[in-house]
Amino acid sequence: MRWHGYRAGNRFIVFQVLPHTLSLGPEVWRVLAKGHEIRNLGEYEGDLNVDERIVRDMIVACQQVAPKLSALPAPGSS
């Protein structure tokens, strides 16, 4: 969405539209949304509860997002 110049007021929307923007399913966006939720709890409430599974899942999700982002043409070139 940012690639198109849009900045969402609610980041959860960014995760939910990944099937439409990068053709990534709920198995990716739900992990990213959970990571964002954990980050917010740590940042705003001091409750940083991170376990190995979420770290592994985040790495896998990011490995799926990265090539999709790399394949996008440079902004303004289309």
Image: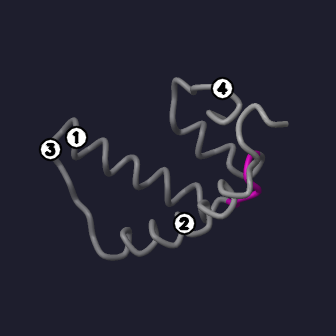
| Marks 4/3: CA–CA distance | 32 Å
| Marks 1/3: CA–CA distance | 6 Å
Say which of 68 and 46 sits in front.
Answer: 68
Q: Earlier in the sequence, mark 2 or mark 1?
A: 1
At mark 1, the secondary structure is helix
At mark 3, the secondary structure is loop
State the residue position of label 3: 46
- Disc 4 to disc 3: CB gap under 8 Å: no
Name the amino acid type tagged 1: Glu
At mark 4, the secondary structure is loop
Q: Earlier in the sequence, mark 2 or mark 3?
A: 3
| Marks 4/2: CA–CA distance | 23 Å
Say which of 7 and 42 sits in front.
Answer: 7
Please report the bounds of the magenta region as a residue range: 21-25
Q: Quadrant of the C terminus?
A: top right
- Residue 6 at x, y = what percent? 64, 25
Q: Quadrant of the N terminus?
A: top right
Name the amino acid type tagged 3: Gly
Q: Earlier in the sequence, mark 4 or mark 2?
A: 4
Q: Is residue 70 left or right of residue 39?
A: right
State the residue position of label 2: 61
In the rendered view, would you say 56 is above or below 71?
A: below
Report crowding for label 3: few under 14, some 14 to 19, many 20 or more residues within 10 A (C-alpha).
few
Name the amino acid type tagged 2: Ala
State the residue position of label 4: 5
**Residue at 66%, 57% in the rendered image:** 70
In the rendered view, would you say 9 is above or below 40?
A: above
Say which of 57 and 70 sits in front.
Answer: 70
Asked which colour scheme the image uses, the reply is one colour
At mark 2, the secondary structure is helix
| Marks 4/1: CA–CA distance | 27 Å
| Marks 2/3: CA–CA distance | 25 Å
